[in-house]
Image (tube, helix red, strand yellow):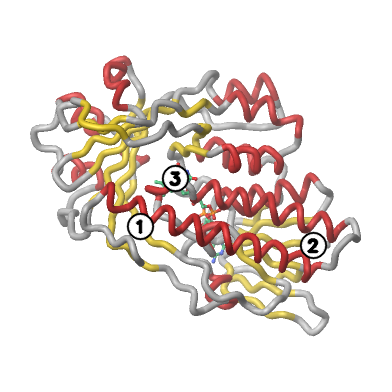
Amino acid sequence: MRVSVVGAGLGGLALAQGLRGAGIDAEVFERDPGIVARFQGYRLVLDLVGFQAVRDCLPARWHPLLDEIVMDASAEQLILDPQLTEIGRLGASRTGIVVDRQVLRHLLLTGLTVRTDAALTGYDVLPDGNVEAHFARRDPVAADLLVGADGVTSAVRSVLSPRTTPTDTGVRFVIGRTPLTDEFVSLSKAYGSKVAGDGVSLLLGAMRFRTPPKRAAEQLAPEVTLPDIGDYVRWAMILPPDGLPADLTARDAVLSRMDGWHPELRALIEQADPDNSALLSIRVVTPGERWPSGPVTLLGDAIHATSPTGGNGANTALRDADLLRRCLIEVNEGRQDLLSAVDDYERRMFDYGAEAVRGSLAKLPAFTPGALSDC
Ligand SMILES: Cc1cc2nc3c(=O)[nH]c(=O)nc-3n(C[C@H](O)[C@H](O)[C@H](O)COP(=O)(O)OP(=O)(O)OC[C@H]3O[C@@H](n4cnc5c(N)ncnc54)[C@H](O)[C@@H]3O)c2cc1C
């Protein structure tokens, strides 16, 4: 069996790793000109389902390395005012695993065949039931199954399910990171907390590695090369619709909403790493109508893009990857035919995927009063 995976995000790479581990031929096609072509380095919190899913997709010999590059999430609790006085609690303790997305992505890339500069433009289902993918600057590639793991603007989805389109919530999100130096240790109660300002929220999370990832790989799995990065604070400001002053950089836009805030909070943003901040729009995709059964399917944000305030997009993409991997192993071992296996995957994924989107939207108004919760 041959599987073409479109998109080298967390979901597509986890699937490709899982298939490779099962001896299934998988090739990944990525639109970016290189695998590290743009900022992808924020901190993620995985729940136990998402973490177990990615673990199961990776070879067991890398599990010690995986465990070394993550940390437990705890105390993700407080609501603070801009002077760092506690004014509330976010709710029940959020347990999970904190991981740097860029580091996890490098681990997932190891050993895979990834074709970069390969933007999918469309596909055809062939008379023999196979599928042929078309790319902007490459020859077509045929496979038994084409998996669109190509994110919120999915080109695969636009052919497979053209009426499923992203909805822009209007909410903007500025994300960045600042090296975790001694100067910011005193802010520690703010890490994992929400600072509630006038119409905006600033979310802070520390990423502290037990061992620097590059060294951890050298010690535990020398065939893996991980990026050389140190501890940092990930900050993210959620801005209401029209809350972004024009003509400002992402960092300056955040500072413009922090007049009179605690000097250490302002210093944290002022010292942000300029190459690692970005302004994002929050768009969601809700799985709606099912498409006719065939050799093409979707996973991750391509079919259920959540608001980052839900903290569940990567978890759900990884859950998809693991579920689809298991279904395709059934096919490879002759216990099920391909189309029924894909159908099983899609039925289950549609249910929990739609729930993940609903859950993330329900949390949006708590972060920004002007947000839509019913899109
Ligand atoms: C700031 C931020 C913080 C987040 N925090 C969390 C968190 O704490 N916990 C959590 O669970 N989730 C979190 N998420 C969500 C999570 O990052 C995403 O849901 C997850 O990465 C989606 O993975 P994916 O593989 O489906 O898609 P993506 O990571 O979007 O990957 C899609 C890939 O497809 C490629 N591509 C696109 N079009 C084409 C094409 N035509 N041809 C070929 N390739 C193409 C893209 O270049 C990209 O590499 C966060 C998201 C953001 C933005």
Q: Residue lying furthest left in this view?
A: 260
Q: Amino acid at mark 1?
A: Ile
Q: Earlier in the sequence, mark 2 or mark 3?
A: 2
Looking at the rendered image, the quarter that the N terminus falls into is bottom right
The residue where tag 1 is placed is 282
Pointer 1 residue Cβ closer than 8 Å to ligand 1: no
Q: Quickly name the residue at label 2.
A: 2
The percent coordinates of residue 148 (x first, y second) are 61, 64
Instruction: Check disc 3: other Cα within 10 Å, few if <14, some if 14-19, many if 20+.
Output: some
**Residue identifier under label 3:** 311
159 to 241, vertically: above or below: below
Label 1 element class: strand
Q: Quadrant of residue 109?
A: top right
Circle nearer the viewer, 2 or 1: 1
Q: Nearer the viewer, residue 211 or 198?
A: 198
Could you give the CA–CA distance between mark 2 and mark 3, rounded to whole angstroms? 33 Å
- Tell me where residue 140 sits by quadrant: bottom right
State whether residue 271 is above or below residue 274: above
Residue 356, horizontal then vertical, whole percent: 49, 55
Q: Amino acid at mark 3?
A: Gly
